[in-house]
Image (cartoon, rainbow, N blue to C red):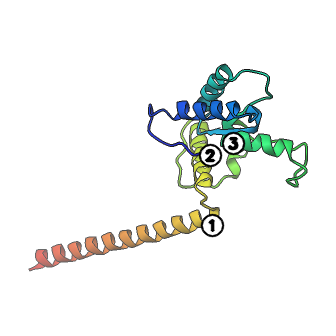
Amino acid sequence: MLVSGPAGSGRTEALLRRLESLTADGIQPQNVLVLARSRAGATRLRTRANALITPPYEELWIGTYETISERLLSEYAVQAGLDPFFATVRLADRLALLLDHLDDLSLRRHEIRGNPAGLLARLLRRIDALKAEGISPGRLRAWAEERERESRGADDTRATIASCARAEASTAATS
């Protein structure tokens, strides 16, 4: 069941009522997967579900896409072809890694003043958003190169206009 709607529209309540209905029909609560968009939303859902559903049951599968994915990969690492002792790299770890290798990064278009952690954290969040949208590095590079070509074309146009204006001014001054 997919539930969507604006804030305050009752999404959480609808999910909780559906979970309650499923458990009343004999489905074990730990066999129901509930995904939330944020950790805060998942926490609220889990708290309310724990208060709503009577034990006994195993741990509820309520979380964000990321936490549920990590849990599934951890529990089924071998079946997924992963090292059973793999570790995920969180945002803070990725930021620390970038800060450690700051001098190796090609950031020629970014002016970094003071602590670069803020800029790098924003870059990481943007990368995560692009990944979530399914935009590959190649597609992003092609987009950026196209914007750069358009920008150079606009610069050439401005230069041509400025040159023509100078020529007209020079011609007017000599006549």
Q: Nearer the viewer, residue 85 or 14?
A: 14
Q: Are marks 3 and 2 in contact (CB under 8 Å)?
A: no
Q: Is residue 80 above or below residue 64?
A: below
In the image, residue 75 lies at what x, y percent? Answer: 85, 42
Which of the marked residues, 2 or 1, is nearer the chain's N terminus?
Answer: 2
Residue 80, image x, y percentages: 85, 53
Q: Give the Cα distance between marks 3 and 1.
A: 24 Å
x and y, in percent, of residue 144 in the image: 52, 64
Marked residue nearer the N-terminal end (3 or 1): 3
Q: Secondary structure at mark 3?
A: helix
Q: Is residue 115 visible?
A: no
The residue wearing badge 1 is 138
What amino acid type is highlighted by mark number 1? Gly
Tell me the amino acid under the disc marked 2.
Leu
Alpha carbon separation for disc pair 3 and 2: 15 Å
Residue 150 left/right relative to 102: left
Dot 2: element: helix
The part of the image, by quadrant, that contains residue 13 is top right
Specify few, some or many for label 3: CA neighbours under 10 Å numbering under 14, 14-19, or 20 or more. some
Q: Quadrant of the N terminus?
A: top right
- Between circles 3 and 2, the one closer to the viewer is 3
Residue annotated with mark 3: 66
At 44% from the left and 38% from the top, the residue drawn is: 6
